[in-house]
Image (cartoon, rainbow, N blue to C red):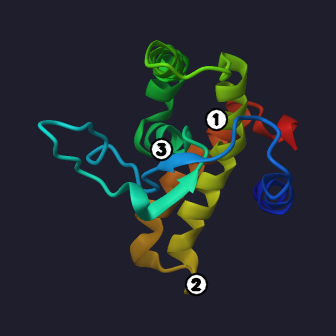
């Protein structure tokens, strides 16, 4: 499974974008303790970190931070809520199908986040962080049939 994700996903993510409307602002390092909104003119994150498909931050937070059972239970509802608020706030030409396809395309990218902990070799100290993360990510890849997109 890991070999399949790492070899085929790279090629599909480098193709001409066909799923959405292009790149959007993404914080690029979403985590459960970092997701927030603008309050009184204060913005708790730096939008300049990256531009990517806008749903990337949701993927990062949901797939990596949530327990598998929680993700399975609430993932679709959160994405539908997110999409409905995009539409309510004037985003046009962005269908639910596009959002969901982009979400599924980005999920396998989380494998790269987990394996970054192994860049210098498998370190016993970091296994407790990256191994559960990798298991959650690969489970999401299977649950969402992400490989069907490439």
Report the residue marked by disc 3.
Answer: 57
Closer to the camera in the image, 21 or 34: 21
Disc 3, disc 2: CB below 8 Å? Answer: no
- The answer to whether 132 appears left or right of 39 in the picture is right
Point out the frontmost of discs 1 and 2. 1
The Cα atoms of the two marked residues, 3 and 2, are separated by 27 Å
Sequence-wise, the earlier of marks 3 and 2 is: 3
> Callout 3: 10 Å neighbours few (<14), some, many (20+)?
many
Sequence-wise, the earlier of marks 1 and 3 is: 3
Q: Quadrant of the C terminus?
A: top right
Q: Could you tell me residue 14's position as x and y percent?
A: 81, 59
- The answer to whether 37 appears left or right of 97 in the picture is left
The Cα atoms of the two marked residues, 1 and 3, are separated by 10 Å
Q: Could you tell me residue 95's position as x and y percent?
A: 68, 18
- Kindly state the secondary structure of the residue where label 1 is placed: helix
- Residue drawn at point x = 39 percent, y = 76 percent: 125
Report the residue marked by disc 2.
Answer: 121
- The answer to whether 29 appears left or right of 97 in the picture is left
- Residue drawn at point x = 59 percent, y = 67 percent: 115
Please tell me whether residue 99 is drawn above or below residue 121 in the rendered image.
Answer: above
Report the residue marked by disc 1.
Answer: 103
């Amino acid at each position: 499974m890991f070999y399949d994700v790492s070899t085929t996903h790279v090629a599909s993510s480098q193709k001409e974008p066909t799923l959405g409307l292009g790149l959007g602002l993404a914080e690029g390092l979403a985590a459960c303790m970092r997701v927030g909104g603008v309050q009184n003119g204060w913005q708790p994150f730096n939008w300049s970190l990256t531009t990517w498909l806008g749903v990337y931050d949701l993927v990062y937070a949901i797939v990596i931070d949530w327990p598998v059972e929680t993700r399975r239970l609430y993932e679709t509802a959160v994405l539908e809520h997110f999409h409905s608020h995009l539409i309510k706030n004037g985003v046009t030409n962005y269908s639910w199908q596009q959002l969901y396809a982009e979400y599924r395309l980005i999920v396998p990218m989380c494998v790269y986040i987990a394996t970054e902990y192994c860049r210098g070799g498998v370190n016993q100290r970091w296994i407790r962080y990256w191994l559960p993360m990798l298991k959650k990510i690969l489970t999401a890849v299977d649950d969402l049939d992400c490989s069907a997109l490439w």
